[in-house]
Image (spheres, rainbow, N blue to C red):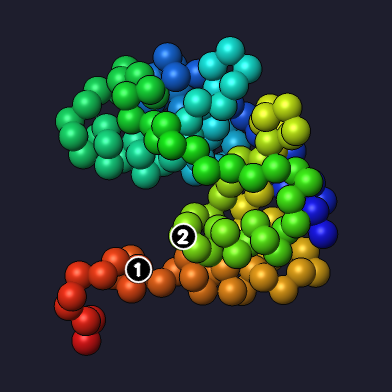
Amino acid sequence: MLVADAMTRDVKMVSPDQSIIDAARMMADCDCGILPVAENDRLVGMITDRDIVVRALAEGKSSDTRIKDVMSPDVKYCFEEDDIDDVAANMGDLQIRRLPVLNKDKRLVGIVSLGDIANTDEVPAADALSAISEPASQHISTGIRPH
């Protein structure tokens, strides 16, 4: 099965120059926790509800803080022609729950989430969820073993 067969196509986007309050309102309106950030028809980042809380509010920034100041510019993505099994495995390896989906021209066409994958007849969602849900300490070698 291809990513295009499972992804969510109706995706709202924000501009890096909009405020975090704009992003928060859009997230509330669409009942989502992540928004792609686009500039000149290109994906330049992602902003999550956690970004707003940890990188803005916890740092004492105001509600008019620009999205570009708290977004994640390092965007992981997949293509709509990618195999859903491979994408699910990558999501598990990266410990992420959602990926923007691009077409062959590298234009945003959707988002695929772990929930989208779980709603398919494919098997990898459980494996991906298991990998995503592992504590970070199991992925970082610190020399100290958890009890």
Which label is found at residue 56?
A: none
In the displayed structure, would residue 66 be above or below residue 144?
A: above
Q: In which quarter of the image is residue 89?
A: bottom right
Nearer-the-camera pick, 137 or 17: 137
Q: Are marks 2 and 1 in contact (CB under 8 Å)?
A: yes
Label tally: 2
Q: Is mark 1 on a helix, strand or loop?
A: loop
Give the residue number, with chain letter if any, for mark 1: 139
Left or right of 84 in this view: 93? left
Q: Residue at x 54, y 16 (%)?
A: 39
Q: Which residue is drawn at 61% across and 74% down?
A: 126
Q: For the residue marked with disc 1, what is the amino acid?
A: His
Q: Where is residue 56 in the image (x, y as percent from the top left)?
A: 27, 32
Q: Where is residue 102 in the image (x, y as percent from the top left)?
A: 68, 36
Res. 126 in view: yes
Give the residue number, with chain letter if any, for mark 2: 95
